[in-house]
Amino acid sequence: MQKLYSLFVILLLMGSVTAQVCPILPNPVVYQKANGQFVCSGTLLIDPAGITPDLGQALKDYALWTKGISVAPFVQNSMIQFKKLQNVIEDSYSINIADRITISYSSDASCFYAWVSLLQLAQIEEGQLIFPKCFVKDYPKFQWRGLHLDVARHFFTVDEVKRFIDLMAYYKFNILHWHLTDDQGWRIEIKKYPLLTTVGAFRDSTLQNHYTTTPRSFNKERYGGFYTQEQITEIVNYAGAKFISVVPEIEMPGHARAALAAYPQFSCTGQAQGVEGLWGVFDDIFCAQEASIEFLQDILDEIIPLFPCQYVHIGGDEAPKTRWKECPKCQAVIKDKGLHDEHELQSYFIGRMDTFLTQKGKKLIGWDEILEGGLSPNATVMSWRGYDGGKAAAALGHEVVMCPGSHCYFDHYQGRNAAEPLAIGGYTPLDRVYEFNPIPTDMSAEDAYYVIGAQGNLWTEYIANMAQLEYMAYPRAIALSNVLWSQSAASYESFLHNLISFHFPFLKSKGVNYSKTATMPELSTTRGENGGIVIQSIPAKGTMEDTLLLWEIPAAKRKTNDLLMHWSEYVIQEYQPSVNQISVIQHKALGAQIVFQTPPSPKFDNGSLTLVDGQLGARPWKGNQWLGFDTDSVSFDIIFDKPIKVKEVRIHTLHDPNSWIWAPQTYMIGLNKFGVVSEQACGYSTDETIVIEETDKKVKQIHVTLRGLSKIPQGQPGAGNTPWLFLDEIEIR
């Protein structure tokens, strides 16, 4: 029997914090709590003898920003003393809170990290500062603990970037990867080439709604902005005071439309085009001619003095070779340099930049596409298309920064609620970030040595303002900080408890528009004992809410049922959902067993029940509602509890070439061991209906084989790559 509930779900937080819970995130190596508290006035008196004046000022400024705590030097009877350590683990520190506070540190950076931990321990009550008596010992796990910020798609002001840095520092990130150029905007002043900002920093239109929405609509208002070199220096110094290094990214040879709008002579065609207002990948990239290389090296000559960090990011991703194949100048370079193809031409291009940066005392870093055609000798690889690029680079003895889209793309959706703000796609919830391991389990210890860390990436096609940026970044960034810093992480439930008890209040106090989706109940669909499906409201991990049965739906003829789910308290700031409605299609395969011969990609594997749970994937797509396959054919069996008559099979697929997702080209259906339907052509559509000839025989098992394209056609986004095949519901009638 169908059971319909109108639910008012009130989140019950865990009980009072136990005495041993450590408020510090990321989790320290050692936290030993003693009895009692250290209580002092609202002003922290520190002995400045153990620190430099610049460090003292940094500590003072940050205490004021985080908790509104004043800091003053006071040698006699100071509350806090500093001790410099020798011959200890890099960036290690300890805090001992007894009758006074002693901070022991190995470097200025570690002193700042200790200070951040101390501020996280601080509670303010009636004008007094209260610290738990305890001992803390800590040091980081990874060298590269980063967040990426794209300011090319949407621009953020100097003050907004500083606020982003302030929040990074609270969770001990030490790398800001600053994506300064792309097709949609050039954001940094280059004095030798002023048109880069007067022309390249502004676009005349911006895509509205999602990339996949048709027909497309555009905001025709002029949009853009850039940072002067003085502003760049201001931000770099601001970050440096918090021991955050800023890594600039200047995209090449692809994602160059903004630069080529200003200086079209460095393209293959020489034709002037505007700054792009659409998202995606475009054929017009930097020509591989010598003049283009010299142009980019001139730019790097102005970039290098502005950024003390040893790394310069040159992009190297998503560079279609269409223009290069047609360009006489590029083909002449291939012939002159004895190169085999355009992939080796890109390797040559990147190699020139590598040599140039090495001579300037810098290290080149690029996305994992720089492996194609041969990896430049000194390059560091940032692996975003899964782990494989990083594994290949490490095997060659190159440094690796892991940021696979499956765990580290914070522009993906993080909640299942239909009212989540528009995102590019994908599904990366908080618990998935928390379980991320930058070192794959199948990587040898020798290769793992080269993995220097990881980062979270914030691409801003669909992030137009600071409130939305913070919503997408937090609390996922906190989970990542724990992955990158902590030697051994606590359970996810304990982590979430810590977030709710200590860190959500802090974020709220700073006006951060953080996401609460991780604390909301989720709709969970499971297979019923006798077939069909069961839908329940499952409490978030780390909460004490009860699981509630919503629906129990048997397999039956096609029928649509609607479930309304209400949240009375947890409203997403600015987006304000109050009701989440789902529709369930009742059909004969509901809750059937799925056995894969071709398993889904781990990146988009939401369980086999996704194909028979009665719920259709949304469009624009969200990763949690689809199964994604990165192969050109998919095979699986549908097994029923008892034989059924089959008149029709409806296979719901997704066709979104702009996202490298292509519907299958052919299908083949097998009924038991007989009645095989010959391979039939599919149209490029969102679903395909397969009609089975009437038969008196009942079916216990159905075999499905779908074949897609082996390569994405030329002229399409991702040309030459294997497309994704996305499946959702398999309806049986």
Image (cartoon, grey):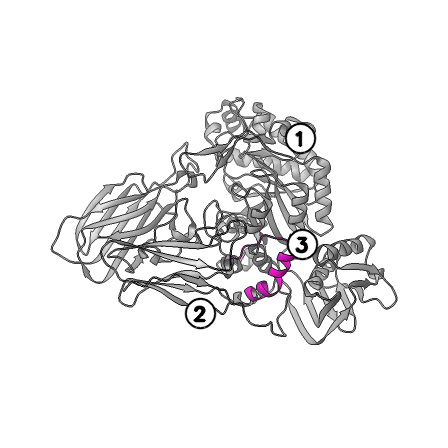
Vertical position of residue 341 compared to residue 422: above or below: above
Of label 1 and label 3, which has the lower sequence position?
3
Residue depth check, mark 2 versus mark 3: number of the one nearer the observer = 2
**Amino acid type of the residue that numbered disc 3 sits on in the rendered structure:** Ala
Q: Main secondary structure of the magenta part?
A: helix
| Secondary structure beneath label 3 | helix
Q: Which residue is mark 3?
A: 169
Range of magenta residues = 496-516
Q: Is residue 473 magenta?
A: no
Q: How many numbered markers are drawn?
A: 3
The quarter holding residue 20 reads: bottom right
Judged left or right of residue 228, residue 591 is left
Vertical position of residue 342 compared to residue 479: above or below: above
Of label 2 and label 3, which has the lower sequence position?
3
**Amino acid type of the residue that numbered disc 2 sits on in the rendered structure:** Asp
Q: Which residue is mark 1?
A: 298
The quarter holding residue 169 reads: bottom right
Q: Residues within 10 Å of mark 2 (few under 14, many from 20)?
A: some
Q: Is residue 501 magenta?
A: yes
Residue 141 or 36: which is nearer the viewer?
36
Indicate the position of residue 444 as horizontal and vertical percent values: 52, 58
* Label at residue 350: none
**Amino acid type of the residue that numbered disc 1 sits on in the rendered structure:** Asp
**Residue at position x 69%, y 38% from top?**
304
**Residue at position x 70%, y 29% from top?**
191
